[in-house]
Amino acid sequence: MIKHSFCDQELIPIGISSCLLGERVRYDGGHKGHSYITKTLGQYFDFRPFCPEVSIGLGIPRKPIRLWRNQEKKIRCVNMGNTELDYTDELTKCGAEQKEWQQQLCGYILKKDSPSCGMERVKVWGNIMPIREGVGVYSRCLMDNFPYLPVDEEGRLGDPALRENFIQRVFAMHRWRDMVKTGLTVGKLIDFHARHKLIIMSHDQVSYRQLGRLVAATTRENLRLNAASYLASFMETLKLHASRGNHMNVLQHIQGYLKNALDLEDKQELVQTFENYRLGQIPLIVPLTLLNHFFKKFPDEYIANSWYMNPYPAELKLQNEI
Ligand code: SF4
């Protein structure tokens, strides 16, 4: 089994639009290879490429297709030069047929703007100017079938906050799948929640309380139902932007675990570092590094087990930019 160095885990299975891996499957015989995806994320992810347009037999090269709003105001996926050639049903069927391998995935990276693969804001053509309101036909099936799956587009991965958010969700999903692989129990769900509490708190305080209540109310009898609700709500919460304000709350909460250990000078250093972070003068990695330094001297089991301190491989440097 292929493994990466982070906690000696296996590579994480991620679906991806084939053209983003450099496969020459686009309508013009080209590709959209993306070096951050292949070189950086490829160290941790086991990519499962798929091209829906090639899969339905459109060939390479081929006439481009696009989303088009017809007379009945329905959005269809048609040939660019001939709207009679409608591929919507074939692409939808193709999307439905991929469910089996897709259910192993921990995330999916889609090609932006594509009438088949685009996640959002795909151009929909009509009589006048196109409007960016569409979703690719294949990606619509994917997201409908797996609403909790972390999905994003390569274009959005250029934004540090969106990139961090997506990768954090992928690693969280991977940990969830790891947990259920060996059989879910109430104890495992409680432990999963305990280790993710601070991450949840950094995204949304209300969900933090709701998820806590859901876990507390879980018994062997309602485990399956509650676990499904937990996963849906957990992944939805992680999609929310983790603001500096929320991170500040979490950092101060963590500081509480050091209150009897630190001397005045160390406390002042921590407070000043948090303040610099709050003001946007330094990235999240700085207060986290300082906290980790103190916890090395004064270990705490709860903090050591919390994924907030170590949500993904440090080499990805995601906390250096948020
Ligand atoms: S965007 Fe999707 S359909 Fe288009 S070439 Fe890439 S993988 Fe194929």
Image: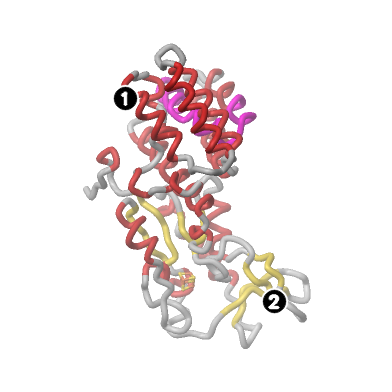
Residue indicated by mark 2: 125
Query: Number of callouts in the render?
Result: 2
Q: Could one spot residue 261 in this view of the protein?
A: yes
Label 2 Cα neighbours within 10 Å, binned few <14 / some 14-19 / many ≥20: many
Left or right position of 17 against 162: left
Label 1 Cα neighbours within 10 Å, binned few <14 / some 14-19 / many ≥20: few
Q: Is residue 292 above or below residue 48?
A: above
263 or 134: nearer the eye? Answer: 263
Residue 305 location (% of width, % of height)? 37, 26
Residue type highlighted by circle 1: Lys
State yes or no: Cβ of the residue under disc 1 lies below 8 Å from any atom of ligand 1.
no
Residue 297 location (% of width, % of height)? 31, 21
Left or right position of 176 against 253: left
For this orientation, the residue located farthest to the bottom is 81
User: Residue 205 magenta-drawn?
Assistant: yes
Residue 94 location (% of width, % of height)? 49, 65
Residue 257 location (% of width, % of height)? 45, 18
User: Residue 156 magenta-drawn?
Assistant: no
Q: Residue at x 45, y 78 (%)?
A: 26
Q: Main secondary structure of the magenta part?
A: helix
Q: Is residue 233 above or below residue 20?
A: above
Q: Is residue 84 above or below residue 209?
A: below
Residue type highlighted by circle 2: Trp
Alpha-carbon span between mark 2 and mark 1 = 58 Å
Q: What is the magenta range?
A: 186-210
Residue indicated by mark 1: 296
Judged from the image, the secondary structure of the residue bearing numbered disc 2 is: strand
Q: Residue at x 77, y 70 (%)?
A: 73
**Callout in the foreground (2, 1):** 1
